[in-house]
Amino acid sequence: MKKVLSIAGSDCSGGAGIQADIKTITAHKMYAMSAITALTAQNTTGVYGVIDTPPEFVGQQLDCIMNDIFPDSVKIGMVSSPLIIEKIVGKLIEYKPRNIVVDPVMISTSGNRLLSEDAMDALINKLIPLATVITPNLAEAECLSEMEIHTKEDMQKAALKLSGFYDGNILIKGGHLKSTADDLLYSNGEFIWFTGIKIDNPNAHGTGCTLSSAIACNLANGLDIKTSIQQAKNYITGALKAGLDLGKGSGPLNHHYR
Ligand SMILES: Nc1ncnc2c1ncn2[C@@H]1O[C@H](COP(=O)(O)OP(=O)(O)OP(=O)(O)O)[C@@H](O)[C@H]1O
Ligand SMILES: Cc1ncc(CO)c(N)n1
């Protein structure tokens, strides 16, 4: 059984964060573990409260996991403060897990900030350099590349800018493009598009978390980066198409559609 670790925040409503990751990993028939970086009080309508885990305790969770059941891949989501990021970075350098997927979570689907402004530096200069692949959405890619992104050409320009400070695999997600849901991978100087029809479903809470943990599962299985992303894209498309409709706002996906 492959083992996948999610380092992320808890979403009590079960659609995003740690809960989405555990559902995704379980749907891939793998063993899920979690190091919780923050508790959020949120639901399909918004984020109403956040309590960060003390950085020392994030470290303690990682020691317990790494010294006992060593993960085949790691997905990192919400990491809200510089001290939490530094603690995670220290542990990743100490234990050297392979296959690190960094989803640079900054703002929730409902528009709430999940990363403090002063954590940006640590994210860019300390955590991202350790990643096998980073998976920003359009807003996060805009923030990281310091340019506006409206079109697929803009996505390519932004990927090139990001490659100026990060030489791993860059996946810019196009879920928020107007008419398509095409994701762009920039890998070893090559652009690869993962095209998708935009599914008419207002319930898209946790798509980013789900995609990044599906990629982590596929990497754990030994698949290459392109195949890992393509299979994750197929999974998220199915989970959206399944058309679950829960809650009063942007509802969660059906992780169990397969
Ligand atoms: N309406 C849609 N139809 C098809 N695919 C979609 C749709 N919305 C998102 N996706 C896909 O879901 C994945 C996540 O992309 P998205 O851009 O929504 O990430 P995100 O904004 O980080 O997610 P989150 O809403 O969890 O923060 C991508 O593969 C994207 O193409
Ligand atoms: C805990 C958590 N992580 C990530 C996201 C992004 O969707 C969210 N809404 N909540």
Image (cartoon, rainbow, N blue to C red):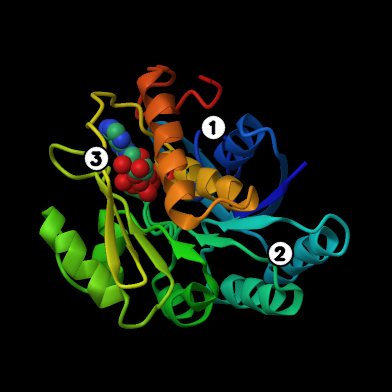
Residue wearing tag 2 = 58
- CA–CA distance in space, label 2 to label 1: 22 Å
Residue wearing tag 3 = 181
Earlier-in-chain disc, 2 versus 1: 1
- CA–CA distance in space, label 2 to label 3: 34 Å
Seen in the picture, residue 35 relative to 240 is either above or below; the reply is: below
Q: Nearer the viewer, mark 3 or mark 1?
A: 3
State whether residue 231 appears in this view.
Answer: yes
Earlier-in-chain disc, 2 versus 3: 2
Name the side, left or right, on which 158 lies relative to 5.
Answer: left
Circle 2 packing at 10 Å, graded few (<14), some (14-19), many (20+), is many
Seen in the picture, residue 112 relative to 21 is either above or below; the reply is: below
Determine whether the residue tagged by mark 2 lies in a helix, strand or loop. Answer: helix
Q: Residue at x 35, y 27 (%)?
A: 203
Tell how many labels.
Answer: 3
Ligand 1 neighbours mark 3 (CB distance < 8 Å): yes
Earlier-in-chain disc, 3 versus 1: 1
Circle 3 packing at 10 Å, graded few (<14), some (14-19), many (20+), is some
State whether residue 109 appears in this view.
Answer: no
Q: Amino acid at mark 3?
A: Ala
- CA–CA distance in space, label 3 to label 1: 25 Å
Q: Amino acid at mark 1?
A: Ser
Q: Position of residue 205 (x, y in %)?
A: 40, 35
Name the side, left or right, on which 163 lies relative to 4.
Answer: left
